[in-house]
Image: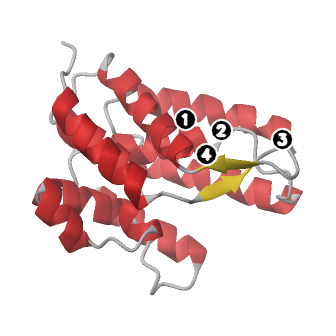
Amino acid sequence: MVATWSQELYAVAWNFATLAHHGQSYGSPIEGQRIDYINHIGSVTMEVIWALNADDIAEPNLAVQCALLHDVIEDTAFTYQDIQHRFGTAVADGVLALSKDANIIDKTEQMQDSLNRIKQQPFAVWMVKLADRITNLAEPPHYWSTEKRHSYQQEARLILNELNACPSVLVERLAGKIEAYRHFF
């Protein structure tokens, strides 16, 4: 059975994410080129929606809203309370779990902490993390060193190992993206 999600809830979350990430961009594989950050948000959400068409996941609206908002707490001035007020506790809890804790200095510990919190959430939130890393395993920014690329691939393996119990086609898709990423070394 295909999970259905609300276009109205999508539109509200998309507009919020667009405003929250306004002016943000990230590096491109092409030197001197920047990509508007909302492109990443749309790509993650596209992966989640694609998976919802194949998977029988409860709470598809939670998955879509968390996909659209997954970087708001981590990368903008908006807080957990802002998201909770606008989208409810379940969405705010999901976005918080998907956010790295800036108080943890070590990057590996930061990721493990987030993964531990994600595993306390419904599978709809797990899907967002899988989709996020799938999207991030596209061709890396031109300025990333080979060491950084290897490290990123290793981190993707950690994510896959921690979240491989998620009943989603995204698990297999992430495994394929990890393997394909070696072409960027």
Q: Tell me the distance, in whole angstroms, between the alpha carbons under discs 1 and 2.
A: 6 Å
Q: Position of residue 83 (x, y in %)?
A: 22, 63
* 35, 93: nearer the viewer: 35
Q: Nearer the viewer, mark 4 or mark 3?
A: 4
Rendering coords of residue 121 (x, y %): 22, 54
For label 1, count other residues whose C-alpha is less than 10 Å away and answer few (under 14), some (14-19) or many (20+).
many
Question: Rounded to the nearest whole Å, what is the CA distance between mark 1 and mark 3?
Answer: 16 Å
Question: Percent from the top left, x then y, of residue 1?
Answer: 18, 12
From what the image shows, is residue 150 above or below residue 8? below
Q: Nearer the viewer, mark 1 or mark 4?
A: 4
Q: Which residue is mark 1?
A: 174
Front residue of 135/7: it is 7
Label 4 environment density (alpha carbons within 10 Å; few <14, some 14–19, many ≥20): some
Query: Residue 93: x percent and y percent?
Result: 21, 62
Asked if labels 2 and 1 touch by Cβ distance under 8 angstroms, the answer is yes
Q: Secondary structure at mark 2?
A: helix
Q: Secondary structure at mark 3?
A: helix
Please, what is the three-letter code of the amino acid marked with disc 4? Asn
Q: Secondary structure at mark 1?
A: helix
Q: Are marks 4 and 3 in contact (CB under 8 Å)?
A: no
